[in-house]
């Protein structure tokens, strides 16, 4: 009986030492290996801050809005009722966000957030309390391309799910002919 207990105790010691060796040797080795791979990736990665340090002309000014967008914007602000503001090139994630049913930082939340985080809405009409009244996308010929159509479907679905009204128009005249325009414009006859 004593021999069995002694043998069991020796085996527990043996397995305990094996587990301890594993924890002390193998896991740090794996971490180091992954760390070295990570460091190599970071080392080879081009960093914007390095480019900016080495080149004081790393950015340049670009025109804000296309000519079509500027024309639309000017007509819109000229004819907008005084109780509204118009904003342009607003990030979608500043207008809508993943539903609260998804815990912030969860995989679902992050997937939904990333889906729209790089997109902008061409124009946004808000009231004086800064509540969103209408989102406007000014579509051009690029919206006919398959990849852009897919993006537009996702864009439309995101706005629909959020409850924010989104309209798509090709020009200001088309906007004038929509029933929604009468809610926001001083005079529907102005062009």
Image (spheres, rainbow, N blue to C red):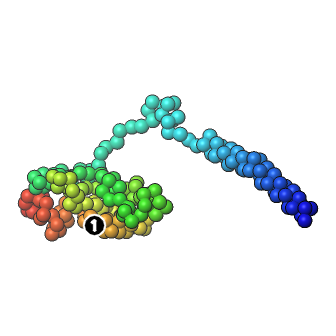
Q: Is residue 160 left or right of residue 181?
A: right
Query: In the rendered image, is residue 175 in sight?
Result: yes
Q: Which residue is mark 1?
A: 163
Check the image and name the residue furthest to the front: 1
Q: Is residue 106 left or right of residue 67?
A: right
Check the image and name the residue furthest to the right: 3
Given residues 69 and 8, the one toward you in this image is: 8
Given residues 121 and 40, the one toward you in this image is: 40
Given residues 47 and 144, the one toward you in this image is: 47
Question: Does 58 appear above or below 70?
Answer: above
Q: Is residue 167 left or right of residue 43?
A: left
Residue depicted at 53% across the width and 39% down the height: 47
* Residue 155 horizontal/vertical position (percent): 36, 64
Number of numbered discs overlaid on the protein picture: 1
Residue depicted at 45% across the width and 35% down the height: 58
Residue depicted at 8% across the width and 58% down the height: 186
* Residue 63 horizontal/vertical position (percent): 31, 43
Disc 1 packing (10 Å; few <14; some 14–19; many ≥20): few
Where the N terminus falls, by quadrant?
bottom right
* Residue 15 horizontal/vertical position (percent): 81, 57
Disc 1 element: loop
Query: In the rendered image, is residue 44 in sight?
Result: no
* Residue 179 horizontal/vertical position (percent): 15, 69
Residue depicted at 30% across the width and 51% down the height: 89
Given residues 53 and 18, the one toward you in this image is: 18
Where the C terminus falls, by quadrant?
bottom left
């Amino acid at each position: 009986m004593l021999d069995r207990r002694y043998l069991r105790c020796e085996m527990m010691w043996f397995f305990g030492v094996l587990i301890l060796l594993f924890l002390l040797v193998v896991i740090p080795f794996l971490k180091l290996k992954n760390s070295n791979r990570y460091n190599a990736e970071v080392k080879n990665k081009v960093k914007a801050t390095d480019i900016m340090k080495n080149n004081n002309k790393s950015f340049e000014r670009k025109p804000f809005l296309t000519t079509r967008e500027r024309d639309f914007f000017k007509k819109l602000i000229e004819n907008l009722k005084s109780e509204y503001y118009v904003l342009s090139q607003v990030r979608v994630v500043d207008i809508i966000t993943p539903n609260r049913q998804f815990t912030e930082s969860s995989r679902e939340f992050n997937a939904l957030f990333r889906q729209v985080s790089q997109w902008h809405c061409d124009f946004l009409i808000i009231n004086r309390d800064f509540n969103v009244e209408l989102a406007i996308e000014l579509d051009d010929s690029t919206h006919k391309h398959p990849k852009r159509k897919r993006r537009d479907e996702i864009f439309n679905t995101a706005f629909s799910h959020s409850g924010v009204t989104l309209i798509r128009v090709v020009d200001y005249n088309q906007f004038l002919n929509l029933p929604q325009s009468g809610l926001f414009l001083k005079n529907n006859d102005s062009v």
